[in-house]
Image: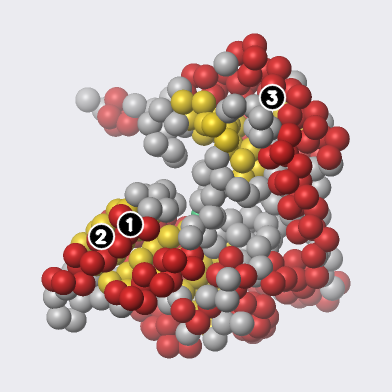
Amino acid sequence: MGLIDRWKITLNTLKSQDRYRNIRAGDGIDFTSNDYLGYGHGRCPISVEDQASLPVTGMGSRLLRGHHPIWEQVEAQLAQWHGAESVLMMTSGFTANEGLLTTVIEPGDWVAADERCHASIYEALRICRPRKYIFKHNDLNHLEDGLRQEAQIRPVGREMFIVTESIFSMDGDLAPLQDIVELAERYGAHLIVDEAHSTGCYGVNGSGLVDALHLRSRVLATVHTGGKALGLCGAYICGSHLLKEYLINRCRHLIFTTALPPLLGAYWCKGIQRVINDNSGRELLFRNVQLFRSLLHDSGWDIRGDSYIVPIVVGEDNKAVRLAQQLWLQGWDIRAIRPPSVPEYSARLRISLHADHTPDCLENLALRLRSIFTEYH
Ligand code: PMP
């Protein structure tokens, strides 16, 4: 048996025509990307000097020639925004999660993770081999059962961790962070929160849900990505000075990779200012959340979450694909999300709302959804 047989894949699954549909170019209005504040198609202008002088390559690891002063500037701005002691840039949210977790968690430690956490978190747990406790999604009782049992038998020198997201990417619901923090403190566990989908949209000047709930000093670390609401690329970890020093010395995902390009750093500096000042963008986004969810509240469909990520769960994969195809034919770019990204028999249309969707557009979409569901559901 060759590798092709073993892999069981269909070739050409990444046809650019299907994957890249330009939101504002008439081939499907974008309800798929994570461009929540609508920054994806408008770059913040940077100075002519920066454009001319800053390299488009990191040229080496951050620990060597890759350490350009612009990243210190970006990290200082981010730390101030979050009211965090320290910030460390990473090349992506995936490597930030994997790097952070595999560095701070040691074999034999105990980790409780929400069952819906992102693949990068599960990948990290596979690598660092802790004793794992996967708790039911947002289920505080199930989490506490695990903490209670572990607290009784915890081996000397072993640490306990809890890992969750603040907004779940496929369900659009918020973690009960306040309660999770209290449980973590009661049982002496360290809490790590992936803020990929809340950064830019929730909290004081958009700095995320942990800050909105004033929990910054009670978490070990938060992970943020630039590739969603911020309209950038790259990611960062917020935590203490000590954590940052430890990661710089030990994190393989930082030490053994080429640093982000300094030119991108100039866009981060502008991008941070843009998101901090854009309260009206956040207002428009939440106006859209309220409007769109209310337009469908009597539909009787299984609509999950409470944020700008609006999943309509239809169950069977084929059904979700058929509905997405019909929507696309009528000018709406909404994708079907199927297992393994979501649990079996919970295929869904994942509708991602943005600040620059107009009320008219949302009303039209709600009407379209109703007629397509009547015809094809
Ligand atoms: N965490 C979550 C919850 C995510 O949804 C994603 C992106 N899908 C990541 C981390 C990874 O971020 P990035 O795209 O920057 O690698």
Q: Residue at x 54, y 50 (%)?
A: 173
For disc 1, the marked residue is: 141
Q: Residue furthest top?
A: 375
Q: Residue at x 84, y 73 (%)?
A: 47
The kind of residue on which mark 1 rests is Asn
Labels 2 & 1 near each other (Cβ < 8 A):
yes
Quick one: SS at disc 1?
Answer: helix
Disc 2 residue lies near ligand 1 with CB under 8 A: no
Vertical position of residue 161 compared to residue 116: above or below? below
The mark nearer the N terminus, 3 or 1, is: 1
Disc 3 residue lies near ligand 1 with CB under 8 A: no
Q: CA distance from mark 3 to mark 2?
A: 41 Å
For disc 2, the marked residue is: 145
For disc 3, the marked residue is: 369
Query: Badge 1: how crowded within 10 Å, few (<14), some, or many (20+)?
Result: few
Quadrant assignment for the N terminus: top left
The kind of residue on which mark 2 rests is Asp
Q: Is residue 204 visible?
A: yes
Q: CA distance from mark 3 to mark 1?
A: 36 Å
- In the rendered image, residue 249, in percent from the top left (x then y), is placed at 38, 83
Query: Badge 2: how crowded within 10 Å, few (<14), some, or many (20+)?
Result: few
